[in-house]
Image: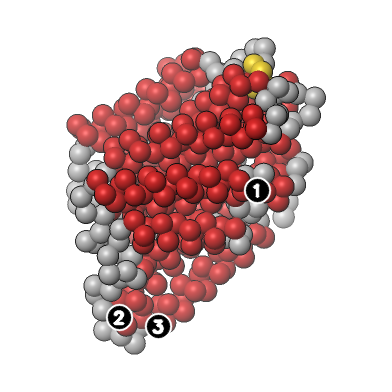
Amino acid sequence: MSIQGWEISARTAGYGVALGCVCFLMALIPGLDGLSVVSALVYWCVCASSWAKINPRNKRQIGFLLAVGTVALLVAVPTDVPIPVIHLLEGNLAIVAMLTGVSFLGLLPDTLKSQKPVLASRGVFSTWASVQLLGAVINMSAVFVVGDKLQRLSSQMSSAQFSVLIRALTSAGWWSPFFASVAVALSVAPNAQFHHLAMIGLPIAVFACVISWWEFKRREVLTGFVGFPLTLQSLTFPVVLAILVLFFHYYVLPDVAILSIVTLLSPVSVILWLWLRGGPRQTKQRLQNHADIRLANMANELSLFLAAGFLTTTVGLALKGWLGEGWSLFGQFGFFEAYLCYLAICGIALLGLHPIVGISLMSSMVPYHDVNNTLLAFVSLCAWAVGTSISPLSGINLSISGKYAVDNYQLAKSNWWYGAVMSFWVAVAMLILSSVLPT
């Protein structure tokens, strides 16, 4: 394909992703709910047309998900269960739209100015806070913003520095409403209370930092640790945006899912900020560049979530058709069942599959009706936070491996002790949730 043809294709894909997000948001307006199907079809078309650009690892996982989902659909067809043909492709649509919306946060400027590095224990805590608080909003971009500066500050980045980058980002998945893990959790368990999740997720994320610091101290690598200083300026926009999301969720649009509020406010607030700072011409140029580059290259992540949603829907139909409407893998869903699901999803992650695969299977076999939705959502958050850090083929480990030329299996292996320790504290947290919160 010529360069010009490639540019046209990329631009079409980028605008297609944006159109899918717009249709999803418009479907929230009463009377326009039919646009959700249009949104799903647009996203599927974009991913299908971008198949050649999807990396081989994702292609294998997507192929597996679609194959199993198709078999499950064929199993469901002979039964009496109604097949919602028009809605089969809408699984995980809210998550895909949210990923599109929060991608605009990558347009925020780099406010981490060049400063002197901080060392030893203070360096660990400062670097962790920088990655987690920024990553909670701008996701993977924060790793590279901080990582690139650490690379310039250090003669050679250490295993401890890489571990901080990985663990700080993944642990943000325990509490950040802008993180894909929270989107997945609230999709699997729509009746979960986000404030309950955040109340227990934040302490665990802080404890993950303390555990890592203790590990580095025990290994005697703190002395040579070079960290990056946290700046208050870099946190202004993320904090304001988080407050806006919570305010809209609890006071302005209480009947709208928090995922949809995040999807709406993320691009709107960024566009407004760009307009005020640079005017209409510069804003238009930045948005066009975003569509041509970032949105056009989202097929890897979007297609994985769409395929996982298809799997969840079809497996659920097959189980409902053959085992009955109220079938569940467990007769009850308490601590033991929750922790068993967590271990199974982490095991699947160690085998190289994305945690979304295990979470999708769990949601098919453990319907959210009549179970503690907050506990069910918390299983997803924990499996995502720990599973992505210990899996050699997770997106974060592969991204750091490719960016900084380190072995992805060594990255994952350096987090196995951390994963084992955090799994103990996950058990404690699940025990508290299952005992304190009502079903």
Tell me how far mark 3 sits from mark 1, CA to CA: 37 Å
**Image spot of residue 433 (x, y percent):** 30, 47
SS at badge 1: helix
Residue that sits furthest to the front in the current view: 218
The tally of labels here is: 3
What amino acid is labelled 2 in the image? Answer: Leu
Q: Residue at x 24, y 75 (%)?
A: 325
Q: Residues within 10 Å of mark 2 (few under 14, many from 20)?
A: few
Above or below for 364 versus 81: above
**Viewer-nearest of discs 2 and 1:** 1
**Image spot of residue 395 (x, y percent):** 60, 48
Q: Are marks 2 and 1 in contact (CB under 8 Å)?
A: no
Tell me how far mark 2 sits from mark 1, CA to CA: 39 Å
Give left or right: position of 279 versus 228.
Answer: left
What amino acid is labelled 3 in the image? Answer: Val
Of callouts 2 and 1, the N-terminal one: 2
Q: Quadrant of residue 64?
A: bottom right
Residue 323 tag number: 2
The residue that mark 1 highlights is: 412
Q: Nearer the viewer, residue 29 or 62?
A: 62
**Viewer-nearest of discs 3 and 1:** 1
Q: Residue at x 39, y 46 (%)?
A: 428
Tell me how far mark 2 sits from mark 3, CA to CA: 12 Å
